[in-house]
Image (cartoon, rainbow, N blue to C red):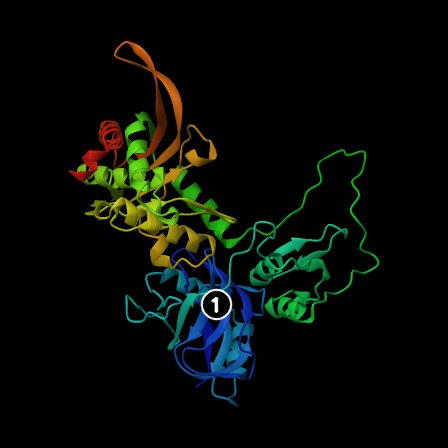
Amino acid sequence: MAEKFLMPKLSPTMEEGQISRWVKNEGDAYEANETLAEVDTDKATMEMTALQGGTLLKILKQAGDTAALGEAIAITGKKGEDISALLSEVASNGSAKKEGETARKGDGETLRADTETGRKGDGEKENKQDDKAVRTSASKSEPVPSSTPQSAVRNPQSDNGRLIVSPIAARMAADNGIDLRNVEGSGPNGRIIKRDIEQALESGTQRPKTKDQRPFTPSTIVDASPYRDEPTSKMRNVIAGRLAESIGPIPTFYLTVEIEMDNSLAVRKQINANLNDDDKISVNDIVVKAAAMSLLKHQWVNASYQDKNVRFYEQADIGIAVAIDEGLITPVVRGANLKGLAEISAEIKDLAEKAKSKKLQPEQYTGATFSISNLGMMGIKEFTAIINPPEAAIIAVGGANPTPVVRDGEVVVRSIMSVTMSCDHRVVDGATGAKFLQTFKQMLETPAMMLM
C-alpha cells in the first residue's frame, strides 16, 4: 500500500531537515537497509535508510528543499500503485504541515539509529511514521570547510548571482582544490551536488569561466562596507536558540578563582615522559579529571533544575566544548570520574575528531551533567561561558601564565590559571559554588587528591 514518507527526527535538537541529495530516484526499487537520501540536520549530514523494501514512487521534496519534522518528503509503496489520492491530499489540504506540527509535539518518540560501524541492537529505538520505519546513520561525508558556506556560496564576480552547493560537494571541492564557479551544477536550480564534483575529478576539467565573469576590483571610494548574506546553518540556528534559552530564563551568577598549576604541570610532564607523542595528555585532560572528582563531592553542582524537582546525577558526564567550522558542539566524556588521565585524553581526542568531521552520534553530544570550555590554549586569560541547559553550571578555563605572587613574604613566579564558573542560581547557591571551586582548586594544586 502506498504511503507518505515523512521527515524523521535525526537528532535530539532537530526541528527541520534539508534534503542534501536523493540517493534513489523516482521509480527506483530499494531493499531494506538501503540509503534513500542524505539529510542535512542541525548537527550533521545523516543517511536516511529504509528498514523495509519498496519503491520510491514520488519525490515531494527535492535536493535543497527543507522539510519540517513529520512533513511528507516522498511517497513509497509498490511499483505501479495509484498515488493520486495521496498527491491530492498533500497538495490541497496542507497535510504535510499538520503532520509536521504533530511530529514536533511527539518529540518523545525516538528514531532507530545505527552507527557507521553497523552496530545494531545497542539502544536501538524506532519511530513509526504512518507504519513506515526508517533507520539513520551518520553520513560518510565530511563537514563543510569554513571557507565554504553550508548551503550557498556568494559569487563575487556577479552582481547578485549565487552558487547553490550541497555541503558534501562544497567539502569535496575544497579538499581537491576545485573552483566551484567552474563547475556545472546538475541539481535543482543548478545546485552543485556530489556527482558534479565527482565528474569534474574524473574528467580533470572544469566548466570554463564565462565572459561576463570579471575579476573583482574594489572601489576607491566606499561609503559603507560591502557585505554578503549567507544562509544560517542548522547548527548555528540551534546554538542561537539554546543560548537565548539559557541567558534569558536562567538566573546566572559567576564565580572566579585563581589556581596555581605548577604541580599539575609537573605531573603532566612526568606522565608524558613515559608516553608516545600521540598518547600524551594535555592540561585540559587534567582539568576534566579534577572537575569530575570534585562533582562527586558536591552533588548540587552535578545536578539540573527540572521545574518541579532537582535531578542529581550519580556520575560525572563532562561535556567538552569543541569549536568546529559552523559553531560549537559539546561531545561528552561519560563517567569521567571513573577513568584515568590517559583514557580521558584518548576519548577526548576521538570525540573532537568526530565532532570536526560531523560524525558524532546524538548520544555522544547530549546528556552531559557539567561542561567545560577551555580557551587557555588560544591565549585567553579569563572569560565567562554560557550554561548549556539543563546543566546547573559550566566552567570557563583560561591559560596558565607565569605570574608573580607573594608566598611566605617573598615574591615568586607561579603558573596561575583563572577559572570562572557560571552557575544556575535555581540549583547552585553562592556558597555551594564557592565550595565546589575550593575542591576543584585543591585537586589541581595537589593532584594526588584526585586519587582519594
**Which percent across, then down, holds residue 180?**
68, 59
Which of these two is toward me, 163 or 410?
A: 410
Quarter of the image holding residue 199? bottom right
Q: Is residue 413 above or below residue 216?
A: above
Secondary element under disc 1, as helix, strand or loop, is loop
Judged left or right of residue 163, residue 301 is left
Q: Position of residue 39 (x, y in %)?
A: 50, 65
Q: Is residue 293 left or right of residue 284?
A: left
Residue lying at the far top of the rendered structure: 409
Residue placed farthest to the right in the image? 211
Give neighbour class at mark 1: few <14, some 14-19, many 20+ (Cα, 10 Å).
many
Looking at the image, which residue is at 77% across and 51% down? 159
According to the picture, the residue beneath numbered tag 1 turns out to be: 71
Which of the 4 image quarters holds residue 382?
Answer: top left
Q: Does 158 sit above or below residue 436?
A: below
- Residue 425 visible in the shown view: no
